[in-house]
Image: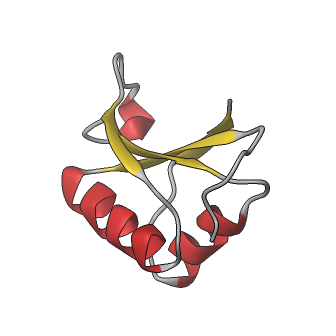
C-alpha cells in the first residue's frame, strides 16, 4: 500500500477540474489517496486553479500523471 506515514505532501497543479478528476482517478488506481483542491489565489499559469494533493515519498505521482498525458502546471512539496 502506498498510503502510510509519509513526510511529504505533493501539491500538483493541474489547471482544470477535468484534469484534477482524471489525475485523482489515475492516482487512486495506483494506490494513492489523492484529494482535489482549489487553489486559493490562482495565478494566470494555474489555469482554472485546481490541484491534486497526495502524500508520497518521492515524485512518483507526478511521473504517473505525466506518463498518462496530464499537463502539470507546477508542483509544490509541503
**Spot occupied by residue 52 in the image (x, y as percentages of width and height):** 43, 48
Locate residue 34: give its quadrant: bottom left
Vertical order, 23 against 66 (above or below): above
How many marks the image carries: the answer is 0
Tell me, what colour scheme is on the image?
secondary structure
Q: Residue at the left extreme?
A: 18
Residue at left 78%, top 54%? 57
Residue at left 40%, top 43%? 51
**Spot occupied by residue 65 in the image (x, y as percentages of width and height):** 52, 71
Q: Nearer the viewer, residue 17 or 36?
A: 36
Vertical order, 16 against 42 (above or below): below
Left or right of 43 in this view: 4: right
Q: Nearer the viewer, residue 24 or 46?
A: 24
Vertical order, 34 against 10 (above or below): below
Residue 70 appears in the rendering: no
Q: Nearer the viewer, residue 28 or 21?
A: 28
Q: Nearer the viewer, residue 24 or 71?
A: 24
Left or right of 25 in this view: 70: right
Residue at left 33%, top 36%? 37
**Spot occupied by residue 9 in the image (x, y as percentages of width and height):** 64, 39
Q: Quadrant of the C terminus?
A: top right
Locate residue 1: give its quadrant: bottom right
Residue 26 appears in the rendering: yes
Amino acid at each position: 500500500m502506498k498510503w502510510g506515514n509519509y513526510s511529504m505532501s505533493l501539491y500538483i497543479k493541474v489547471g482544470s477540474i477535468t484534469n484534477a478528476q482524471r489525475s485523482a482517478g489515475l492516482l487512486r488506481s495506483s494506490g494513492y489517496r489523492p484529494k482535489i483542491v482549489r487553489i486559493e489565489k490562482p495565478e494566470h499559469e494555474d489555469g482554472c486553479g485546481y490541484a491534486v494533493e497526495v502524500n508520497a515519498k518521492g515524485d512518483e505521482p507526478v511521473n504517473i500523471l505525466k506518463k498518462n498525458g496530464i499537463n502539470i502546471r507546477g508542483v509544490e512539496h509541503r
